[in-house]
Amino acid sequence: MNGAIEAPTIEYGQLMPMLLVFGAAVVGVLIEALAPRYLRKAIHVPVTLLSLAGAFALIILQAVRDGVPEQASAMGAIAVDGPALFIWGVILVLAFISMLLINDDDQFVAQAAAVPGSPEEEDAVAQGGAHTEVYPLALFAIGGMLLFSSANDLLIMFVALEVMSLPLYLLCGLARRRRLLSQEASVKYFLLGAFSSGFFLYGMALVYGFAGTVDLGGISSALASVGGQDSLLYIGVALLGVGLFFKIGAAPFQAWKPDVYQGAPTPITALMASGTLVAAFGAVLRVFWVALGNLDWDWRPVMWAVAILTMVVGAILAITQTDIKRMLAYSSIAHAGFLLIGVIATGDAEQNSGSLSGILFYLLTYGITTVGAFAVVTMVRDAGGEAGHLSRWAGLGKRSPLLAGIFAFFLLAFAGIPLTSGFFGKYAVFAPAVSGGALGLVVVGVISSAVAAFFYVRVIVLMFFSEPAADGPTVALPSVGTAAVVTIAAAATVVLGVFPQPVLDLADQAASALFIR
Amino acid sequence: MTTHYLVLSALLFAIGAVGVLVRRNAIVVFMCVELMLNACNLAFVTFARQHGNLDGQLIAFFVMVVAAAEVVVGLAIIVTIFRTRRSASVDDANLLKY
């Protein structure tokens, strides 16, 4: 202790993908401040898409050229390891295609401050255009997702959680139509999200009290060295778990998901349902495997219960839904349960990397199919906007066989039918779980998949074997972006369902060295 | 003795959590969330004292900044819905269900 403060070393090269996204978000704020209104969108679109593509290219460059670093970057705060690079890549791909949907006109409110139904709103709509703040907000959320999935200490994880969530709370309230629903979704998401991050934070405080550090590796070594503070640790871990389970939408903390998914603008729902889930699973894995890996005998029974509850609640409540977005939300809850099976199936290093690789592959397949499904939802429209109610989808197969066929294909992928990506995703998670001794969970998983298949097939039957209503919804001619999203998602679902091996190998490779500490 | 501070922090956290669950006005609910965050800060600073390192105090600063950002976003959302509905009650916002 000589009083001198050493400057921290920060590996800017490794953090570059994330810094690029955050940098583009800051540039986006400047564009909002400086560019004239009519030019803003034209500047935002290339900046946003190029930064996401550039970040993706940097990740590939780093993985190919530099390999995976031996230790965490930025003084142990951020771990850019194999799983992190894979998850970053997945998030950026999903964010890029969600961004193509967000580009679509006609989704976001013209003037959020104008009260719905007021003359000001009519003026704003008549002037045309929409809020372009959507772009920087989405970029901040995406940057937060990248940071959340690679945080190597709990403080960074908490900050990243908020950087990811705060823009999403706002984005949820910006739907152009059905603004009351959208605002209500935003308030609910915000209040519940803030509530859950309070739990996360208190859990973090208690774990800090136990370990004297918030570094994930430090917590892991404190598990062995600190004695007699067990209650502090257990309560802390439970509260941390509440915060994380809320983010992935695991039961019994799933209540926000259907409301928020239904109320939010559909492109934002696509971003949340894919990117946030991927990022949150990255964080869950880090907390429970890196920091609490040696405590697995204690958290595993609770996680069993949560996983079973999540799968059952997701699959059964989805059957009763009458709104397509709510149904997809419950399906996302069920999928979070399937993914939790992989989190539970730990053991020796080989077992862990098998489970991890399965989770990584599942996240990719599920994310892409989800964005595609929500893209289809944006195209089926009524006079008042998207036709959300399932009864309106009756006979869609007769009006627009191609679109209905693609949507049916996405639903089959969610159900995990062979020759779709969903089949190999489920197989990649369930197979290591069986060898990891979680056979009971896999049985529950397969049964809830079967239950879930029922309501997916119900929608397919509705689309193809019912007579279309006389005043049924029209299928909007898709913009280039939306058409591209549907095409990319459908192609990925086919390719990953027929030739999954290259991507499975990539996931294996990313997972082989597990997480660095 | 740092135990008293921990008990106080747990009490504040519990009051905040109960407040979120029972109060009906979105602003009050939000204030209760802020109370929970402040309870966390107290716990962090106490544990920092107990462990004799500065991490906890440093975290408290981060939490304050995050809480401030959350106020900005939260009040914007609550004011918007208040202007639409002329009410900030979380019970009135009930279009999304089942």
Image (cartoon, rainbow, N blue to C red):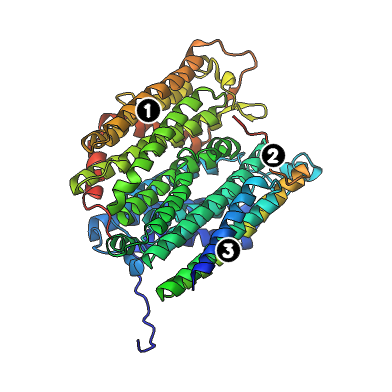
Where is residue A75 drawn, in percent x and y?
A: 34, 70
| Amino acid marked by disc 1 | Ala
Please identify, in this view, whether the residue under mark 1 or under mark 2 is nearer the observer.
Answer: 2
Which mark is drawn over residue B38? 3
Where is residue A335 drawn, in percent x and y?
A: 40, 34
Mark with earlier residue (2, 3): 3
Q: Chain of mark 2?
A: B
User: Can residue A401 be spotted in the picture?
Assistant: no
**Near-viewer residue (A153 or A80):** A153
Give the CA distance from mark 2 to mark 3.
28 Å
Q: Give the residue displayed 31% in from the left and 62% down from the top.
A: A217
Q: Chain of mark 1?
A: A
Please identify, in this view, whether the residue under mark 1 or under mark 3 is nearer the observer.
Answer: 3
Element under disc 3: helix
Q: Give the residue displayed 56% in from the left and 22% down from the top.
A: A390
Categorize mark 2 by other alpha carbons within 10 Å: few (<14), some (14-19), many (20+): some
Give the CA distance from mark 1 to mark 3.
45 Å
| Quarter of the picture holding the N terminus of chain A | bottom left
Viewed as shown, does residue A166 lie left or right of A439?
A: right
Q: Chain of mark 3?
A: B
| Amino acid marked by disc 2 | Ala
Q: Residue furthest right?
A: A119
Categorize mark 3 by other alpha carbons within 10 Å: few (<14), some (14-19), many (20+): many
Q: Give the residue displayed 49% in from the left and 38% down from the top.
A: A252
Viewed as shown, does residue A426 lie left or right of A319?
A: left
Element under disc 1: helix
Give the CA distance from mark 1 to mark 2.
35 Å
